[in-house]
Image (cartoon, grey):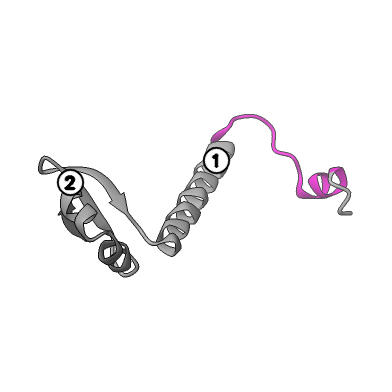
Amino acid sequence: MVSISISAARDDLSAVVERAASEAIVLERYGKPAAVLLSPTRYAELLEAFEQAEDVAAFDAAMAEEGPSIPWEQVKADLGWA
């Protein structure tokens, strides 16, 4: 990951966007991170990973709930799979 000022990025935006294809670019304002520029591919990968993490967290929360479990055969019947 590389950092660049917003004004420097503005001066050569096409090169900065091209570089973002291979690594994340941190855009800085007054020396502090203000934004991150990513390739569309990397952005999609991060979104997918985040969604998978949410799915795992939801599964863990469901498994931690107290109460009776529903047998798998019943679940399949309720969904019309059996």
User: Mark 2 Cα within 10 Å, few/some/many (few <14, many 20+)?
Assistant: some
> In the shown orientation, is residue 57 left or right of residue 10?
right
Of residues 79 and 37, the one drawn nearer to the viewer in this rendering? 37
Residue closest to the far left: 31
Which circle marks residue 69 in the picture? none
Q: Quadrant of residue 8?
A: bottom left
Task: For mark 1, give the secondary structure.
Answer: helix
Q: Which residue is mark 2?
A: 28
Position of residue 78 measured from the top left corner of the image (x, y, whole percent): 85, 42
In 3D space, how far apart are the residues under numbered discs 1 and 2 (Cα atoms)?
Answer: 35 Å
Figure check: 2 above or below 6: below
Q: Which residues are magenta?
A: 64-78
**Residue type marked 1:** Ala
> In the shown orientation, is residue 26 left or right of residue 69?
left
Viewer-nearest of discs 1 and 2: 2
Q: Quadrant of residue 70?
A: top right
**Residue type marked 2:** Glu
Q: Is residue 12 within the magenta segment? A: no
The residue shown at (79%, 45%) is 75
Task: For mark 2, give the secondary structure.
Answer: strand
The residue shown at (10%, 43%) is 31
Figure check: 39 above or below 66: below
Position of residue 72 measured from the top left corner of the image (x, y, whole percent): 76, 49
The residue shown at (50%, 44%) is 54
> In the shown orientation, is residue 22 left or right of residue 81?
left
Q: Which residue is mark 1?
A: 58
- Please identify the quadrant where the N terminus is shown: bottom left
Of residues 19 and 8, the one drawn nearer to the viewer in this rendering? 8
